[in-house]
Amino acid sequence: MKRTIKDSVFTDLFQDKKYLLQLYKALHPEDTDVTENDLNDITIKNVLTDNIYNDLGFTVGDKLMILVEAQSSVWTVNIIVRALMYLVQTWHDYFERTKQNLYKSKKVQMPIPEVYVIFTGERKTRPSEISLSQEFFGGKECAVDVKVKMIYDGKEGDIINQYVIFTKVCNEQMKKYGRTRKAVMEAIRICKDQNVLREYLISREKEVVSIMMVLYDEEEIMRSYVESEVYDSKIETAKRLLRMEKLSYEEIASGSGLAIEEVEELANELQPV
C-alpha cells in the first residue's frame, strides 16, 4: 500500500535546533562548547520509505549522528539493516553535497558515523549495543558491520527521557480511549502537567494533534489491511482443502481457521452449476 510520508513527533521535535542541541548533549555531555550553529540537519526526506518516518540525521563537526526510533512492542533486529541503509544513503548525499568524486584518486573525506536506536517499546533484555555481524552472521568477520547503540529511557529529565515518557503516556491514553482525538489531548495535558516536553507541546499543540491523528489513521489502515490479507489466506486454504474432497467441514474449519458456516458457504460456491 502506498502511504503518504508525514513527520512523526520524533522528527518534528528535533527539527527545532533547540531540542536537537539538547539531544546531542544528552549523547555527548562532554562536548560543552557545541552550539545550535554547529548542528546541520541532514535528515533524509522521502527516500527510504513511503510510511511515516521517524529517522533523524545531523552532523556536528566531524561526527555524523544517525538516530532511528523504534516504537513497536515486537522487537526486530532488522532495525540494524534499516540503520545501515539510512547511513549509506546519508553518505551518498554527503558526497554529492560536498562535490566529492568517488571515482577519482583523491581519498574522500567523510564524517565519523554514530548510529543510535531509541527504543520506546517493552523488552525483557536491554543490550547496550547490537551489531550486524553478531545478529545476522553469528559474530563472524564479514565485509560490512554496523554497531548500533541502544537507548531505552535516557537520563531522568533529559530530552530523550522526556520523549520516551511522552510516547508511553500516549500509549496509555490510546489503550484507555482508543485511537481518538481525546486520547491525544489527554496525553498532551498529562505531559504538560508533568513538565514533559511542556514548552514544545504548548508551542506545537495543534501540529502534534494533527501528527498523532494521521499516525492513528495510518495504523488503523494497516491493521485492516493485514486482517484482510490474513482472512483471504484462510479462504484460499479452505478452498484448497475442499477441492481435495478428503476432509470433513469440521477438519477444514480447524485447518483453515474459518468457522464451519464459512466453510459450508465456500463449499456451496465451489459446487458446479
Image: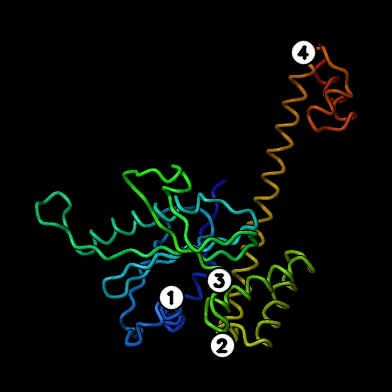
Q: Which residue is mark 3?
A: 9
> Horizontal placement of 98 versus 63: left or right?
left
170 shown above or below 142? below
Residue 220: quarter of image: bottom right
- Specify which label sits upstream in the sequence, 2 or 1: 1
**Observer-nearest of 29 and 237:** 29
Q: How busy is the neighbourhood of tag 4: few (under 14 within 10 Å), some, or many (20 plus)?
A: few
Mark 3 residue element: helix
C-alpha separation, residue under disc 4 versus residue under disc 2? 65 Å
Q: CA distance from mark 2 to mark 1?
A: 21 Å
Residue 145: where, in percent of width, then height? 36, 50
Q: Which mark is residue 199?
A: 2
Residue 81: x %, y % from top left: 44, 50
Q: Secondary structure at mark 4?
A: helix
Q: Which residue is mark 1?
A: 27
Which corner quadrant holds the C terminus? top right
Tell which tag, 1 or 4, sits nearer the viewer: 1
Mark identifier at residue 244? 4
Q: Which is more toward the observer, 101 or 23?
A: 23
Whole-number angstrom distance, CA of label 3 to CA of label 4: 52 Å
Q: Tell me the amino acid under the disc marked 1.
A: Leu
Label whose residue precedes the other's in the sequence (2 or 3): 3
Q: CA distance from mark 1 to mark 4?
A: 61 Å
Determine whether label 3 and label 4 are within 8 Å by CB.
Answer: no
Side (left or right) of 74 relative to 94 = right
Q: Is residue 206 above or below residue 178?
A: below
Q: Amino acid at mark 2?
A: Glu
Residue plotted at (74% across, 36% down)? 231
Residue type (three-letter) at the residue carrying disc 4: Met
Residue 113's tag is none
Residue 186 lies in what quarter of the image? bottom right
**Would residue 239 be found to the left or right of residue 66 on screen?**
right
